[in-house]
Amino acid sequence: MPDGHCGFWSVAVGLGMDQSSWGLIRRDLVQEMDQNESIWFPIFEAWDEGYFYTHRQGLIWDSVSDCPPDHWMDFPLAGLLIAQTYGIGVHLLTTTMGASSTFFPILSPPANQQPLFIMLAHVNENHFIHVKLEGDYLMQPANGLWLNHRRPYTEQWEDMYLPRLEWKTPRDLTEASLSGAGISILAAISMIFLFGMELHSYLTISTSTAIIIDKSSIEDTVRVDFNISFPLLSCEFASVDVSDVLGTNRLNITKTIRKYSINKQYQSNGHEFHSVPVAHVKHDEKVDETYGEGSITLNSRNFDKVTHEHALVVVNFFAPWCHWSNLLSPAWEKTAKVMRQRYNPKYDGRIIVASVDCTQEQALCGKHHIQGYPSIRIFRKGSDIKDRTGIHIHETYYGDRDTDSLVSKFDNMVSSIGKESLKYIDGKPVNYTTVAPAPHQEGCRIEGFVWVKKVPGNLIISASSGSHSFDASQMNMSHVVSTLSFGSTITPMMMSDMKRLGPYLGAGHNRLNGQAYMTSPEDRANVTIEHYLQVVKTEVLGLSHQLIENYEYTAHTSLVHAHSIPVAKFHLEFSPMQVLITENAKPFSHFITNLCAIIGGVFTVAGILDSILYNTYKLAKKVELGKNY
């Protein structure tokens, strides 16, 4: 039964004394504390303030009667005292007083090769008994207090019984040291740094690139988007044509093309220019030559005077060398004579039919943006609006060119003068489908898209008309490419993938964007600008598993003196190979595996370094104390 002395008489029994010698044990422990007070005092005070004197007072009890709990044996400091007092090893087996452990003397090394060990078992939370073990039993690990307060030369205790201390915590991990603290800090910093690098690697998406055969069928088409400005090509005659080696030949595409008149500074009035579709133009089959010249000849000196004096002036801008001008000339002169007879300039003067020879009046024709011959312009007094350059905005006639058609059209226009509406006469609509506004400015911005087959072909922009002629020496195909790209329109989701994959795609999908191709004055005559484009298909398989098609191209440009009308020509050559770019995300399991490897590796390396530093330090201490062996 516990009587408060059980711990002390268990020590007595372990030392080979009678259990009634518990009082001697108490006195020996008090004497040890008094003799080495300078050593024990800081140890006890570190455990609890004032505990040195409390523990010493608790050891004093001489009565055989049951003693109060504050005089009972109190571990773990009692274990250090007992081991040092008797120069023995003390095993404590317990589940309620901390972990089971072994105590060695903190001031003295082993006196011989077989020092005495006693084992105390704490049971029922309030009773000590002595346990006797025989043979090379496994020992409990050294107590932490002993590891912290021992003298260097007492390590021989642990070294002597190292094989039996199987559960011993390595001393370099239990003893606090400055080197250990430094290594711990470095290990923590290393783990944080390596974790950050691994996290960045996990979040970074890798890509793989492969070159494969383009498996597109011969019927597959590619969309070509473009926005090109021609400062010296009139929208009236600008034509977009597509052809290829398979025989495709589409002329004057209009369904997906828009045109805007621009000036030499590439400025537009914002209104789209709508071309009037012109089918076969009818001319007089037979002309009565007796009519002679009936139109008034205009030049730069009298042009403004005539157009401002008469309500309606219809002018034929022609060139004598032009086939279509020569076909129109007889009917035009006959019509002029008929109009003069019906609306005599002296008495009526509502309409004047005139002509301008553009080979003689190049400046005047250029001022009114004349590029094709013949061009029939209609000037209305008081109804014309001036553009930014002061030039009247007028209309162009696109109808048949025989005498009857011209006379009928001009009669309708004259009859509308003075009416509130120019579109109705006596309640009946007048057919003006053959009359449309002339281009406001001399240049043209062409934008839109066309579909081409993935075979060698051409995209051609030129001046074209089935009923006009052009002076090749006056045509200038200088242009600025705002955009030129291949492939379908990219959705916002695709665009996010494209931005992420931008470094892998390169800038080849818009290589011509923002490039200007201007001919110098000395090269102006009959200069065709040719662009040679090598187009390569690129497919991107992103993390969203959506296949994105993109086309990149190289471009080379040359100026060629043409024998016919100059054009801007884009030669398209599609490569039979394509580039496949695949995004690869790192698996989460790979990230966790690497993370565990980082933690384990850093701990292992830190432990090795700490052990090396610790053992080197201890060896230096032993050498200093004369314990080098």
Image (cartoon, helix red, strand yellow):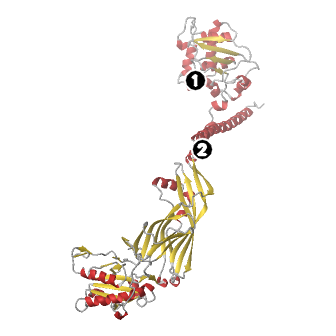
Instruction: Report the amino acid beneath label 2.
Output: Leu
Mark earlier in primary sequence (1, 2) = 1
Instruction: Report the amino acid beneath label 1.
Output: Phe
Q: Front-most of 243 and 94?
A: 243
Describe the element under mark 2 as helix, strand or loop.
helix
Q: Residue furthest front?
A: 286
Query: How many numbered badges does the structure rendering display?
Result: 2
User: How far from the left and from the top, in percent, is residue 325?
Assistant: 42, 86
User: Do tag 1 and tag 2 residues touch (Cβ < 8 Å)?
Assistant: no
User: How far from the left and from the top, in percent, is residue 454?
Assistant: 56, 63
Describe the element under mark 1 as helix, strand or loop.
helix
**562 vs 153: above or below:** below
For label 1, the residue is 44
**451 vs 520: above or below:** above
**491 vs 336: above or below:** above
Q: Quadrant of the C terminus?
A: top right
- Which of the 4 image quarters holds residue 105? top right
Mark 2 crowd level (few <14, some 14–19, many ≥20, 10 Å Cα):
some
- Residue plotted at (62% across, 14% down): 121
**293 vs 277: above or below:** below
For label 2, the residue is 194
- Residue plotted at (60% across, 14% down): 122
Q: Front-most of 26 and 511?
A: 511
Eye-nearest disc, 1 or 2: 2
- Which of the 4 image quarters holds residue 19? top right
Distance from disc 1 to disc 2, alpha carbons, whole Å, reads 43 Å
Residue 121, disc: none
User: How far from the left and from the top, in percent, is residue 309?
Assistant: 26, 88
Work out whether residue 561 can be spotted.
yes
User: How far from the left and from the top, in percent, is residue 219?
Assistant: 54, 61
